[in-house]
Image (cartoon, rainbow, N blue to C red):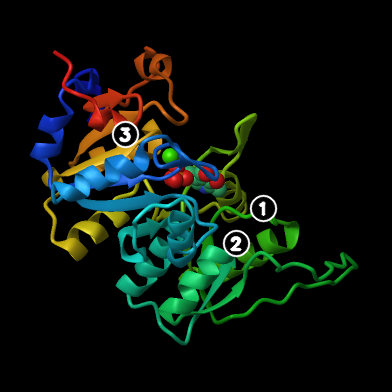
Amino acid sequence: NYTTRALAQPLTDADQLIYSVETFIFDCDGVIWKGDKLIDGVSETLDMLRSKGKRLVFVTNNSTKSRKQYGKKFETLGLNVCEEEIFASSFAAAAYLKSIDFPKDKKVYVVGEDGILQELELAGFQYLGGPEDGGKKIELKPGFLMEHDKDVGAVVVGFDRYLNYYKIQYGTLCIRENPGCLFIATNRDAVTHLTDAQEWAGGGSMVGALCGSTQREPLVVGKPSTFMMDYLANKFGIMKSEICMVGDRLDTDILFGQNGGCKTLLVLSGVTSLSMLQSPNNTIQPDFYTNMISDFLLPKVA
Ligand code: PLP
Ligand code: CA
């Protein structure tokens, strides 16, 4: 019930926040990096937190890469982060299917990019679809009927720069013709920042296409849904009150932390400005806000 939350406070005592929690969950884009560029001071900040014995976890709604591919990205950026600390929404989709014992003889139809395919493969699930799908022509002659695999038991939709009508129709057939078929979304981010010059249609746009045709709502496994938070807390045996969620986006990251009962810190190094946070139209208030995570290294403000 965010309406009763106090207004976010500037972070004046980072040491106290660090002392009060055991785990930091960091959102990636806008907190750790911007696109392919590391944000200043991140490496030193992570090292400092590790030296204090804090557990560090990294969560991203960007489903285009697998955790293995993110591991490479962290390494390329010179950050000391291992795959097991990374939880992307691509991984979350596969983890969710595992958690419900999705049958291995059923198939997953993927509207999305390589990251989701890699995670499904690693988890041992059969899948079809993916970025290349839909090269086939749809011939709209009288009587034309598009076939689909009746063994598809789940449709997973994530960000897909190669979305086309074939994929929308395929996913629609799977869901509409089989009421038991699961409809899973990696995330519903309205927009994303593929370049810093403008906002670009996000994963929510691909999910929206399937919502429109199926008239069903998906189960979201990425932020702000609680699936990943529950998964993490369970996996590492962490109390949610001992977690601080650090992110740059109010309706995904901060809500994710609040839905999970964690402390929340908004950083202004990404998509949210101080005026957006303080706008009367904004209903989501983190506990604290600060410019960037390297503010953790600054001496306490008197
Ligand atoms: N989805 C896509 C396609 C993106 O490009 C991004 C950011 O780059 C995101 C989601 C949001 O990622 P994050 O949750 O790390 O901020
Ligand atoms: Ca972000």
Residue 7 point in image, percent of width and height = 23, 17
Marked residue nearer the N-terminal end (2 or 1): 2
Q: Is mark 1 within 8 Å of ligand 1?
A: no
Q: Evaluate if marks 2 and 1 touch, with contact meaning CB atoms under 8 Å apart.
A: yes
Foreground disc of the pair 3, 2: 3
Check disc 1: other Cα within 10 Å, few if <14, some if 14-19, many if 20+.
some
Report how far apart the C-alphas of labels 3 and 1 lie in the structure: 31 Å
* Residue type, numbered disc 1: Arg
- Picture layout, residue 32 above or below residue 174: above
Viewer-proximal residue, 283 or 34? 34
Percent position of residue 148, x then y: 66, 76
Mark 2 = which residue? 113
Q: Which mark is residue 136?
A: none
When the figure is inspected, residue 47 is found, relative to residue 31, above or below; the finding is below
- Residue 157 image position (x, y, % from top left): 54, 58
Query: Earlier along the polypeptide chain: callout 3 or callout 2?
Result: 2
Quadrant for the N terminus, please.
Answer: top left
Q: Tell me the residue that label 1 is attached to.
A: 161
Viewer-proximal residue among 218 and 19: 19
At label 3, the amino acid type is: Ile
Q: Going 49% across and 55% down the picture, which residue do you hit? A: 76
Q: Which residue is mark 3?
A: 293
Q: Is residue 196 left or right of residue 243?
A: right
Residue type at numbered disc 2: Glu
Of residue 28 and residue 206, the one placed in the foreground of this image is: 28
Above or below for 279 versus 148: above
Q: Is residue 285 visible?
A: no
